[in-house]
Amino acid sequence: MSSKLHWVVLAVWSIILTSSVLYLSTLKAKQFDVNGLLLSNAMDTEFDHRFTSLIEETLDTRNGAVVHFTMDNCFCEYVAESHVTSVKKLASEQGFKNHVITLKSNNRFNIPSVPAVAVINQNGKLTYLGPYATGMFCSEGEGLVEQYINNNTEHNALGATILTDAQGCYCNLG
């Protein structure tokens, strides 16, 4: 009889623990562009060019680059670590250079949150800027950026895809 009670207590404990983790994870979901800074900057028709020029001041983007934006002590980067690693691997396989830029608040790139990524194609055009994924766990199956790396020769005539309306595990910069 005590064996049966042991399994019931274990099952109830597991349900409570799982429910608590899921509940707490929903409380931490944040908007990527919480103050609308990136959205307002992206409205400028010259934004893509200015952003790419700013990146090129410090990094070699010839033949394509994937720029990974990070910051110190961001728990969400630990959550997304396997996804970021898979994006870096895909970028290398597609001939892109991977670069990492560690940001502070009020950064000159106007990146509102991390983890964030930018894709500059082989023609030197910004094709994507935003989070790696949406959702609390930023998992590979929910990835947003991969399609811009796999389809690296095309560039939307209207400009880059700049994702500002996303919710997930992000550390806001300012």
Image (spheres, rainbow, N blue to C red):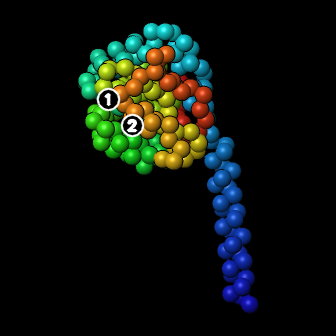
Can residue 90 be seen here? The reply is yes
Q: Which residue is mark 1?
A: 65
Residue 138 locus on image (x, y percent) = 52, 44
Side (left or right) of 33 relative to 127? right
What secondary structure is found at the residue carrying circle 1?
A: strand
Can residue 76 be seen here? The reply is no
Given residues 88 and 151, the one toward you in this image is: 151
Alpha-carbon span between mark 2 and mark 1? 13 Å
Residue 80 locus on image (x, y percent) = 47, 45
What secondary structure is found at the residue carrying circle 2?
A: helix
Up-down relation of residue 168 to residue 109 (above or below): below
- Residue at 56% x, 18% y is 39
| Residue 159 - label | none
Q: Residue furthest bottom?
A: 1
Up-down relation of residue 22 to residue 2 (above or below): above
Up-down relation of residue 161 to residue 47 (above or below): below
Given residues 2 and 79, the one toward you in this image is: 79
Q: Which residue is mark 2?
A: 150
- Residue at 32% x, 20% y is 124
Q: Amino acid at mark 2?
A: Asn
Up-down relation of residue 37 to residue 117 (above or below): above
Side (left or right) of 169 relative to 107? right
Q: Nearer the viewer, mark 2 or mark 1?
A: 2
- Residue at 66% x, 45% y is 26
Name which of mark 2 and mark 1 comes first in the sequence.
Answer: 1
